[in-house]
Image: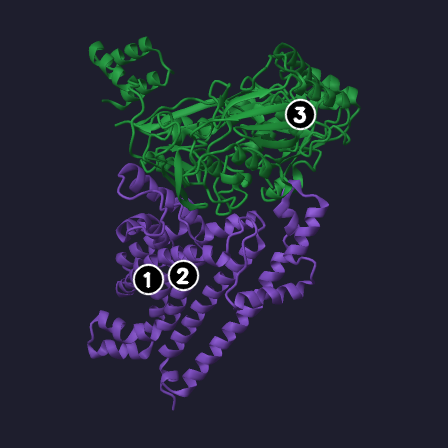
Amino acid sequence: MSNELEFLSRRVAAGKLSRRDFLGRAAALGIAAPFANSLLSSAARAAGPVKGGTLKAGLVGGESTNSLDPALMMTQVPFAFGKCWGEMIVELSPDGKLENRIAEEIGSSDDAKTWTLKIRDGVEFHNGKTVTAEDVAATLERHSDEKSKSGALGYMKGIATIKASGKEVVLTLKEANADLPYLLSDYHLIVQPNGGKDKPDAGISAGPYVVKTNEPGVRHGGERFANYWQGDKMGHADQIEVIVINDATARTAALQGGQVNMINRVEPKIVDLIKRVPGVTIRNHAGPGHYVFIMHCNTAPFDNNDLRMALKLAIDREEMLTKVLRGYGSLGNDFPINSSYPLFTEIEQRKYDPDKAKFHYKKSGHDGTVLLRTSDVAFPGAVDASQLFQQSAAKAGIKIELKREPGDGYWNEVWNKQPFCASYWGGRSTQDQMYSTAYLSTADWNDTRFKRPDFDKMVLAARAELDEAKRKQMYHDMAVLVRDEGGLILPMFNQFIDATGAKVDGWVDDPHQELMNGYALAKCWLQA
Amino acid sequence: MSSPILKLIAQRIALGILLLLAISVLIFAGTQILPGDVAQAILGQSATPESLANLREQLGLNDPAYVRYFHWLGGVLTGNLGTAMSSGQDIATSIKGRLWNTLFLAFWAAIVAVPLAIILGLIAVRYRNGWVDKLISGLALASTSFPEFFIGYVLVYFFAVKWQIFPGISTVYEGMPFGERMQAIALPATALTLVVLAHMMRMTRAAILNVMQSAYVETAELKGLSAFNVIRKHAFPNAIAPIINVVMLNLAYLIVGVVVVEVIFVYPGMGQYLVDHVTKRDVPVVQAVGLIFAAVYISLNIIADIAAIIANPRLRHPK
């Protein structure tokens, strides 16, 4: 079969090309319709999962300093491997809904302050013990403890008491929160025997794979867990392996050479090149991650909303999207939410408008240059993006001076310290989480110093509101406030760009995180 | 073996130890100067003043620097390198595997590179200024002039992606069969060989050519010895000291300077380990790795010195 044809049939199977278009292109290549049709059916045949084989992923984001302690997971490799050996209380499904895992049922009181998790029967840990309500409660307790240094601590602080009784875990919250089930889907909250209090990095949970090798920064491997409670849905390959490949070129070469079956973080600039490599399929899809320029609303000269507005209008988002992300992303609109969040509402797109920018700039009374700090580590292409910003602003009469900061120490010394710099956000699973993490007056990571009591009140009110329509309106109002008065310039949302090699089947795009929200190894299979 | 040689060797080793001590002071001082407080680096964004104070106490950061230095040195001398701050693992254990990997790769690269470089050097001298000499020098210099990552990527492109002869990623692990292990390191070892080849080859050539000007070589030629025998029997033994020196320098490079190659081929060696911990401000690991690199460098240089001493007939046969 010609590479071209194989490529096209894979596009059809991935839903990116219609059947009719395929037959047309096949005819153009001189293939008779009956043969093309049979080709198509073999490519698109989704006869269900195939068991067996070893599925390997080559991923960026692993270091020799990584640990199996779920509380300390931060980068992509521990995250993706955690989804292989760990089991969650509740998870987000690819369609944005909640999927109950160890919790069979989640119910709340009318005021959204007391929550009851009913624990599923017959889920077994890798050490042979049965998962109990006590284990779940202990897990939540450990992550609420300052000493665990858990990445989920920020949300867990809102839980006042955790009690296990029989098959239920009852949580009471300090303040009402309608989003609690979403918070429990945080990837750090892997259920461990006795909450991992005895040995946090033992790597024992109830996920589809048992940890076999753990060499931080090198490779991690797992073997299918025979007693997995959902063996028909996950854990198709006999073994899975994560190989840490931080170098982008090496990662691509490993996929092309067939040493790994999937990779993450394909660079936008090479997507078009490797798309045509036989066997390779690009898996790109929108997520909540975004690239930003952030201004401190309480520091001169950015304490002037006219200056902030002038800068927001002086950035050419479309140009940046095509040149920096090569189209693998979507336009930002100066508030951190897009359609990958539940309850998202459209707001009129802000466009590049040098005249209006000039007007606001004059009105602000600012004179001289504006200093923008940038670095390669702020986001891929941040320096290029900053230069584009400088040029588009110059057309509006605004002089931006660029200062390129060293990557080492950027997140300690520049981000969240300097009044105007480039940065990125990976996004969160709910709007409340995103706004609570970075836009509440009291948030540690309020990197735009957006301190507005009226906004804080809106966040708390929306959090406690169980009526969806009302909540939607509240989030709309909050978004408008951040967009028009905040310190955030958000030119673009990036996409996750993963790639899979030949024979990998079962891929489902997931808007929450890269690699099918980390489940690619557990949910995909190798065609026989 | 006579006493002057033993004395000289003992002197060298003592000097080496002194040097290592001096370097340990430098390393310690250097890690103290690094910007950022260690406790702050560990706790990160979520640091509260109390937890910072607790951690400083726990790490002994409140003691004066010289107390901490001797504390650390005492640990190192008794084989206790401490525990890594970022992952809490014992440093000695995690370094052992990494160091072994690095030495393994360096060993096989050296096994290929050193004889090849010396033989090519000898051939170049034999056919000096002819096309063979120029070809050898030109190719070797070209391979050295290309940056390591370029050579690495070219090798990966052809051998791993196009022809799929060798794997493009060289992840090795404990218990890996020897054959597989050799196949895994084929490409990084080749890349390293190409990088160090020219330096050794050119040095061999220059050292021997230097000796070739001497009167005794002319005598040997007049005796009617063949060109190769002149080089092998008369020129090479007298040029050996500078050759050993440059070989040792390159061996040291193979061990301490391979970060780029390790990253490209995803090889779990010391370089990658060091880089990971520098970015995390994991000072104990940085100190330990720094010291090991210094020790490797110094001992290889001592070996070079000693070999040069032994190779010098005036020292071997004192009057």
**Residue A428: x %, y % from top left:** 57, 26
Please tell me whether residue A207 is drawn above or below residue B166 in the rendered image: above
Residue kind at label 3, given as amino acid type: Leu
Give the purple chain's letter.
B
**Residue B60: x %, y % from top left:** 66, 58
Q: CA distance from mark 3 to mark 1?
A: 58 Å
Q: Which mark is residue B250?
A: 2
Please tell me whether residue B266 is drawn above or below residue B230 in the rendered image: above
Q: Chain of mark 3?
A: A
Q: Secondary structure at mark 1?
A: helix
Residue kind at label 1, given as amino acid type: Val
Q: Residue furthest right?
A: A365
How many residues crowd around disc 2 within 10 Å: few (fewer than 14), some, or many (20 or more)? many
Q: Quadrant of the N terminus of chain A?
A: top left
How many residues crowd around disc 1 within 10 Å: few (fewer than 14), some, or many (20 or more)? many
Please tell me whether residue A439 is drawn above or below residue B161 in the rendered image: above
Q: Quadrant of the C terminus of chain A?
A: top left
Question: Where is residue A257, by image quadrant?
Answer: top left
Q: CA distance from mark 1 to mark 2?
A: 9 Å
Camera-side residue of B157 and A412: A412
Residue at the spot of label 3:
A488
Q: Chain of mark 1?
A: B
In the rendered structure, are the residues bearing label 1 and label 2 in contact, judged by CB atoms less than 8 Å apart?
Answer: yes
Residue B122 falls left or right of residue A319: left
Mark 1 vs mark 2: which is more N-terminal? Answer: 1
Residue at the spot of label 1:
B114
Residue kind at label 2, given as amino acid type: Asn
